[in-house]
Image (spheres, helix red, strand yellow):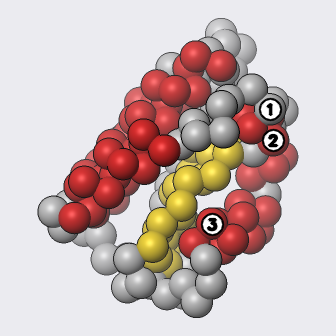
């Protein structure tokens, strides 16, 4: 079901690893084929199912993509939401949409991850004692 080649999956994973070198934030990607509800609402469910609210600084970010339904959302944990402006993810979403429109799914996800890392760096810089609290692999559902 992945909808992503092995090479594309590796590119996304490398984007996560690169981004997390600049921030103490934790970024994950969750992909599924169908989403029968609002993508943001589904992303919230996935966020908690993946126990992303368990990071020390509550600074996890989930990039959620429903392939067949052409939906996606980016959500951050409460530690992020307390310090960022309300429209924090809008510019990241726009970069992703531009790539998605050109049928560049992996590139769009990767750009979103890299931009998220850059943005998070401002609020959650990488710490010398930082631990990778969440896996960097893409989560594939259904």
**Is residue 12 shown to the viewer in this render?**
no
Which image quadrant is residue 50 in? bottom right
Residue 8 is left or right of residue 73, and the answer is left
Residue occupied by mark 3: 40
Up-down: is 117 above or below 77?
above
Distance of label 1 from label 3 (alpha carbons): 18 Å
Few, some or many residues within 10 Å of mark 1 (<14, 14–19, 20+) = few
Q: Are marks 1 and 2 in contact (CB under 8 Å)?
A: yes
Up-down: is 77 above or below 30?
above
Q: Residue furthest left?
A: 102
Up-down: is 138 above or below 133?
below
- The label number, if any, that marks residue 82 in the structure image: 1
**Whole-percent x, y for residue 12 in the image:** 36, 50
Distance of label 2 from label 3 (alpha carbons): 15 Å
Few, some or many residues within 10 Å of mark 2 (<14, 14–19, 20+) = few
**Whole-percent x, y for residue 27 in the image:** 57, 43
Question: Which quadrant is the N terminus positioned in?
Answer: bottom left
- The label number, if any, that marks residue 78 in the structure image: 2
22 or 68: nearer the viewer: 68
Please tell me which residue is depicted at 56% across the width and 20% down the height of the picture.
121
Please tell me which residue is depicted at 75% across the width and 45% down the height of the picture.
77
57 or 136: nearer the viewer: 57
Residue 23 is left or right of residue 82, and the answer is left
Q: Secondary structure at mark 3?
A: helix
- The label number, if any, that marks residue 60 in the structure image: none
Few, some or many residues within 10 Å of mark 3 (<14, 14–19, 20+) = some
Please tell me which residue is depicted at 15% across the width and 63% down the height of the picture.
102
Up-down: is 104 above or below 88?
below
Residue 116 is left or right of residue 61, and the answer is left
């Amino acid at each position: 079901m992945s909808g992503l080649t092995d090479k594309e999956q590796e590119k996304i994973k490398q984007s996560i690893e690169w981004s997390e070198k600049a921030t103490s934030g934790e970024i994950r990607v969750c992909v599924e084929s169908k989403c029968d509800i609002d993508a943001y609402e589904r992303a919230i469910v996935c966020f908690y199912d993946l126990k992303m609210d368990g990071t020390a600084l509550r600074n996890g970010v989930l990039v959620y993509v429903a392939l067949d339904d052409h939906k996606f959302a980016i959500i951050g944990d409460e530690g992020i939401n307390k310090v960022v402006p309300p429209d924090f993810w809008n510019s990241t979403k726009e970069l992703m949409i531009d790539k998605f429109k050109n049928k560049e799914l992996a590139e769009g996800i990767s750009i979103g991850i890299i931009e998220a890392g850059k943005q998070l760096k401002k609020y959650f810089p990488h710490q010398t004692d930082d631990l990778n609290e969440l896996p960097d692999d893409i989560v594939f559902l259904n």
